[in-house]
Amino acid sequence: MDATDKPRLYRRGPLEYAAWAVCVLVAGGLAHTLVTNENYQWNVVGQYFTAPTILEGLRLTIVLTILAMLFGGILGMVIAVMRASTVRPVQLLASGYITFFRGTPVLVQLIFWFNIAALYPNIAVGIPFTGISHAVDVNVLMSATTAAIIGLSLNEAAYLAEIIRGGFASVDKGQIEAADSLGMSSRKKLFRVIIPQAMPTVVPATGNQMIGMFKETSLVSVLGVAELLQSTQLIYARTYQTIPLLIVACLWYLIMTLALSYPQSLIEKRYSLVRSRVSREAPVDPVPMDGEAR
Amino acid sequence: MNGDGTVYARRLRKCYGDRVVLGSIDLDVRSGEIVCIIGPSGSGKSTLLRCIDGLEEVDRGILRVNGEDLGFVETDTAYRALSRKEMAMQRTRIGMVFQQFNLFPNMTARENVMAGPVLVKGVAKKAAASRADSLLADVGLAGHGDHYPWQLSGGQKQRVAIARALAMDPSVMLFDEPTSALDPERVGEVLAVMKGLAERGMTMLVATHEMGFAKEVADTVLFMDGGLVVEQGPPTAVLGNPTEARTQKFLEKVL
Ligand SMILES: Nc1ncnc2c1ncn2[C@@H]1O[C@H](COP(=O)(O)OP(=O)(O)OP(=O)(O)O)[C@@H](O)[C@H]1O
Ligand SMILES: [Mg+2]
């Protein structure tokens, strides 16, 4: 064999061999117990995996995730803009919101919204001083699903507001000065200069939040909302096949999370490219010299 | 052109907290005059230009650009702040070029130049685009309209930044060390564009360390130190035959 074609064999440390051994042992043991332990009841898992109740629950979980991210995103954007305001009281309102919603558990917030009727049994919607008003019974209005959407959205808004604020902070101060110097209005500055440049930081982080939210929706099962987890609970409450049904739920959560991870990795790759371009001072491959038409 | 292209200041004062950054500045810049501001680091050159562009709040004194009080109207007892919109209108008549270019990285060179006219003045996109292309050609960047800032060299970026400022038809142009962030071989191309602009009668205030440029182009050289104008006059006097000891010391170091 020609010396120039010979492959180079690099050394592997003993730690690496040991780690592989542990890996194989764990995987083997896990496979063994999964197959031999009858209590997993894989046939039941298979039976319920695509049962209508489960699929209906999965659908609701997806809808809840999308709505919570959507409303949370819109509100989060408003709060982030308020937080960045130079008007002190506006800033304080936003900080207060963020502190409260990040400082208390989501589960407690969800139960709170579900029981809000205890605080405000009736709300009247009306136009002040005109006598036109319409009273609403809060108990009827605040169904479990409504409480779930409100609770998840309001909580998510606080986290997204912080992410968006971080995005705003990542925009170079010189950009704002350049926009000011041209006489740009605050709105134009926000939408044409700040937001486009905050995207590379905000979008990947929001994607991660979305993956987190997908699993967080399982909390609303305590309100009796028939999302994925609650749907399995409804079944095993009847059949007592608790473990196989929880496996069904876990498999769906895992599948959906993996499905979201792929676009997430693409987004991260794309935006890290944008970031590195923006921060690069001189071009690596200089474009043709001045005045040359292309 | 908008405005008469003059800058007038009397006892202009600017502090950061307790720190006096501009002590008491007097300026009389005629229309079409080229003023080069020199001085050691931290002497207040940038701060002065930023005040004239309305990027910094002035504490005291008179500051009139294009014959109008900048950001304020004078009443019997005080200066009352203008609305944001009126302030923005004044700013459109003042162009600023930054040391770090500050081009919008999310826009192409052409879009950068169009940004002011389209987003601030409401000019139609098509008209703004063709105007942008001719401005880019003026600064020697014909054909670069579709390039993003990251595809341009420092000198090219700075020339786009000049075109962006010119697109607003300002009557005063401010340059804050426009060549300090450039590779030495790129400095000339930016200075050439600025010379061209000076010949066309633009009022220019340039903070710079380029003594050659000051000597050749400036009508007036202003030497600043410690937030004060220590010496001013034609370049032959200030650069060639300074009377103040501080000016002499500074020039010995840089020349
Ligand atoms: N935002 C700020 N807060 C506090 N101090 C500041 C601020 N900006 C500038 N200064 C101070 O004001 C003084 C003048 O700064 P300025 O940038 O105007 O100097 P300069 O003459 O432009 O210097 P250089 O040649 O380094 O650019 C410096 O001492 C600086 O530390
Ligand atoms: Mg400076």
Image (cartoon, coloured by chain):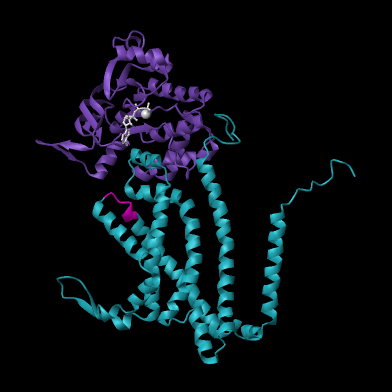
Q: Where is residue B213 shown, x and y percent of the image?
A: 42, 18
Observer-nearest of A288 and A153: A153
Give the side of residue A175 with respect to residue A132, left or right: right
Q: Colour of chain B?
A: purple
Residue at the extreme right of the image, as rendered: A1
Observer-nearest of A197 and A21: A21
Residue drawn at 50 percent across, 79 percent down: A229
Q: Where is residue A143 shown, x and y percent of the image?
A: 36, 81
Residue at the extreme top of the image, as rendered: B241
Observer-nearest of B62 and B141: B62
Q: Quadrant of residue B42?
A: top left
Residue drawn at 44 percent across, 43 percent down: B126
Residue A46 appearing in the image: no
- Report the quarter where the C terminus of chain A lies: top right
Q: Colour of chain A?
A: cyan
Q: Quadrant of residue A267?
A: bottom right
Residue drawn at 43 percent across, 34 percent down: B100
Q: Regarding ligand 2, which quadrant of the image does it lie in?
A: top left
Residue drawn at 34 percent across, 50 percent down: A187
Residue B119 appearing in the image: yes
- Report the quarter where the N terminus of chain A lies: top right
Q: Where is residue B65 shown, x and y percent of the image?
A: 25, 30
The residues colored magenta run: A81-86
